[in-house]
Image: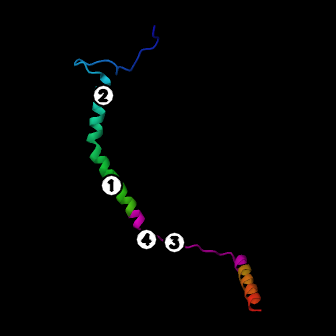
Amino acid sequence: MASQKTTNFEACRDLSGRRLKTVNDAKRIADFKSKEPERKRKQQENLKAKIEEGLKEFEPKKIRFDDVEFEKDHEKVREDVKDTVSK
């Protein structure tokens, strides 16, 4: 009939008559609830770290622009515009 053996026994019942899936779900829920304070603490720490990161003073990047050719062209354009406006 079935060529493969099953590994899922959650539909079976234990000695008290409860389904194993129900028992396993109850264990998982208990574990989840017992670890809740730790999760809340970790969440608060992450939030606090994020707030501290946001409150840090922003240091703008100092960009050094050492293109001599561009500076010459830029200065020439400024002088040309200045001459044109003053006429």
Local crowd size for mark 3, using a 10 Å CA cut-off: few (<14), some (14–19), many (≥20): few
Q: Which of marks 1 and 3 is in front?
A: 1
Q: Quadrant of residue 81?
A: bottom right
Q: How is the image coloured?
A: rainbow
Tag 1–tag 4 contact (CB < 8 Å): no
Residue 60 located left or right of residue 86: left
Q: Which residue is drawn at 45% across and 14% down?
A: 4
Q: Which amino acid does label 1 sit on?
A: Gln
- Residue 44 numbered tag: 1
Magenta span main SS: loop
Tell me how far mark 3 sits from mark 4, CA to CA.
9 Å
The secondary structure type at the circle numbered 1 is helix
Residue at label 3? 60
Q: Which of marks 1 and 2 is nearer the N terminus?
A: 2
The kind of secondary structure element at disc 3 is loop
Give me the C-alpha separation between circle 1 and circle 4: 22 Å
Name the mark on residue 57. 4
Q: Is mark 4 on a helix, strand or loop?
A: loop
Image location of residue 70, percent across then percent down: 71, 76
What residue occupies the far top of the structure in this picture? 1
Tell me if label 1 and label 2 are in contact, CB under 8 Å. Answer: no
Choose the circle earlier in sequence order: 1 or 4. 1
Residue type, numbered disc 2? Asn
Which residue is at the front of the view, 58 or 16? 16
What residue did someone put label 2 on? 24
Placement of 14 over or under 41, stated as above or below: above
* Label 2 crowd (10 A; few <14 / some 14-19 / many >=20): few
Q: Quadrant of the C terminus?
A: bottom right
The span picked out in magenta is 52-71
